[in-house]
Image (cartoon, rainbow, N blue to C red):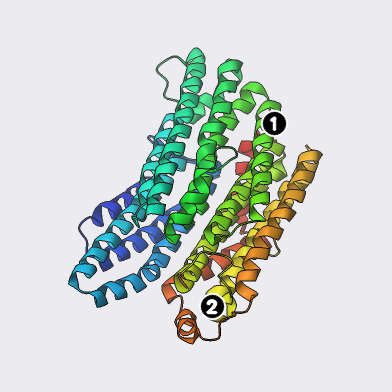
Amino acid sequence: MTTALVLLVIVPLAATVACVWLPLRAAQAATLASGLVSLGLVLTLLWAPGQSVEAGWLMVDPLSLVFLLAVGFLYPAVAAYSIGYLADEANAAAAAGPQAQADFERYARRFSLGLNAFAWAMLCAPAVNGLALLWVAIEVTTVISALLVAIDATDGATEAAWKYVLIASSGLGIGLLATVFMYYAGAQVLGQSYDLAFAPLLQHAAQLPATPVRLAFVLAVLGFGTKVGLFPVHTWLPDAHSEAPSPVSALLSGALLVVSFYAILRYLQVAQLTLGAQFPHDVLLIFGVASLALAALYLLDQRDLKRLLAYSSVEHMGILAIGVGFGAPMAAAGVLLHVLGHAAAKGNAFMGAGVLVRRFGTKDLHRLRGGLDALRWTGPLLLLAVLALSGMPPFALFRSEFQIVVGGFTTSAWAAAALVGLVVIAFAGLAGSITSVLFRPRVAADDQDEVAAMSRAGSGWMLAPVIAGVVVLIVLGVHPPAVLSDLLARGAAELTGGQ
C-alpha cells in the first residue's frame, strides 16, 4: 500500500514531464494512461488496513481518501474527453495548412502537460501529511489552473485568469496566515521544531491555546474558502469556469473546489478538539447558508450556460459547508458522499455543456435551443447530469442531500429548513434553464446543415466518460459498495470526533 501511495504522486508527474517531448497523440495517450493508473492506485488504497497509509511526508486516511477518489475519477474521465474535444480543432488545423497544424499541436501538447500537472497537484493535496505541505499543494493548483484557464488566449480568458490569480492568491495569503497561527498554537505544546503534521497536532489539540486556534480556523475558512467558492470570496469562480475550456471547467468544479474544502476540514478537526464543536460549526453554517442563498438567487437569472453551472458549484459548496456545520454523523457521511457525487455530476454537466457550446457556437442560454433533437446522445446525458445536480433520485446527490438534511434536523433545525428551501429555489433555476435549452424547439427552419453537424456531436471519446459518470451516480445513489460505505463512515467519524 505504501508503494501505491508513492506511485500516486509519481505517475502524474512523470506524465507531465513526458508531455514536454512526446508527439501529440502519444502525449494524449500518456495522459489517459496516467489517469487510469492513478484511479487504479486510489482504488487500491481502499483496501488498506483501516484505509490509512503513511509514507514519509505522504499520508492517506479515510477522510483524505474520499477526496482522492473524486480527483482520481475525474482525471481519466477528462483525459478521455479531451481527446474528442480537441479532435475538431485538429481537423480544422490540418485543413488550414502546416503552420496552423503546428500551432495546434503546440497548443494541444501544452494542454496535455497542464492537465497532468493540474491533476498531480490535486492528488498531492489530500495525500500530503501536514498543514504546511497542504497549503503548498493548493497554491500549486492555483498557478497551474490559472494557466489552463487562460490557455485559449482570448481576452475573456485572460481577464478571467488574471482575476482568478488576484483573488485566489489573496485568499491563499490569508490561508498562509492561518497556517502560521496554527503553527504558533502547536509550538506552545509540541515545541518549535514540529512540522504541522496531522497526527501530533490532533493528538495534542485539546492542550492548544484557544485564541490562535480560533483565529487560524476563521482565517482558514476565509482563505481556503476563496478557492472553494464560498460567499463573499467566490467572485472569480463564474468567470474562470465560463472562460476555461470545458475539460478544465470540469476539473475546476468537480475536483479543485472540493480539494480546497478538504483543507478547511483539516483545520476543523483541530478546532473541534481545542474549542469544542459549537464555534467552528456556527462559522461553517454562516458561510454555507450565505453561499447557498447567493447561488440560488443567481441561478434564477443567468444567460450564460457555463456561468449557470458555475453558480451551481457555489450552491453545492454551500451545501457541503452546511452539512459539516450540522456536526451530525449522518450529515458528515452525506457530505463525503456529496463530494463524490458532485465530482461525477458536475464533470458530466461541464462535459455535456462543452459539446453543446461547441456545436451551437454560443453559451447564451437564450440562443441555445433544440438540444435534444440536435444532440441525440449528449443531450439526454446532459439532462441526466442536471437532474443529478438537482438532487433527483436515484442519483447520488439525492441520497447525500437526504442524509445531510436528516442529520441537520437533529442538530440545527433552522439551518436544515433553510437548506431545503434554498435547494428548491436552486433546482428551479438550474432545471428550468437546462430543460429550456434541451426541450425548446428551434425557431429557424433553414439550419439543416448546422443541425446535421450538431447531430454528429460527441465522438466515443466524449461520450464514454459521461456514460461512466452516469453509472457512478446511479451506483452511489442506489447502493454504494460496502467498502465505500465503510470509508464514508470512517471519514464521518473523523469529522465528528468519533461520535
Circle 1 — which element? helix
Mark with earlier residue (1, 2) = 1
Q: Is residue 88 above or below residue 23?
A: below
**Tag count:** 2
Q: Which residue is mark 1?
A: 282
Distance from disc 1 to disc 2, alpha carbons, whole Å, reads: 44 Å
Asked whether 340 or 425 is in front, the reply is 425
Instruction: Give the left or right position of residue 160, taking residue 15 as reference.
Output: right
Asked whether 260 or 330 is in front, the reply is 260
Residue ID at (48%, 53%):
241
Q: Is residue 137 above or below residue 207?
A: below
Residue ID at (50%, 22%):
182
Q: Is residue 41 above or below residue 407?
A: below
Instruction: Give the left or right position of residue 157, taking residue 438 as reference.
Output: left
Give the x, y percent position of residue 297.
68, 50
The answer to whether residue 178 of the structure is visible from this angle is yes
The answer to whether residue 61 of the structure is visible from this angle is no
Q: Quadrant of residue 245?
A: bottom left
Give the x, y percent position of residue 408.
76, 42
Give the x, y percent position of residue 73.
48, 58
Disc number placed over residue 436 in the picture, else none: none
Residue ID at (56%, 70%):
368
Disc number placed over residue 377 in the picture, else none: 2
Q: Quadrant of the C terminus?
A: top right
Give the x, y percent position of residue 398.
69, 58
- Whether residues under marks 1 and 2 lie with C-beta atoms below 8 angstroms apart, the answer is no
Q: Name which residue type carries label 2.
A: Trp
Asked whether 128 or 297 is in front, the reply is 297
Please rate how many residues cluster around mark 2, counting C-alpha atoms within 10 Å: few if below 14, some from 14 to 19, many from 20: some
Circle 2 — which element? loop
Q: Name which residue type carries label 1.
A: Asp
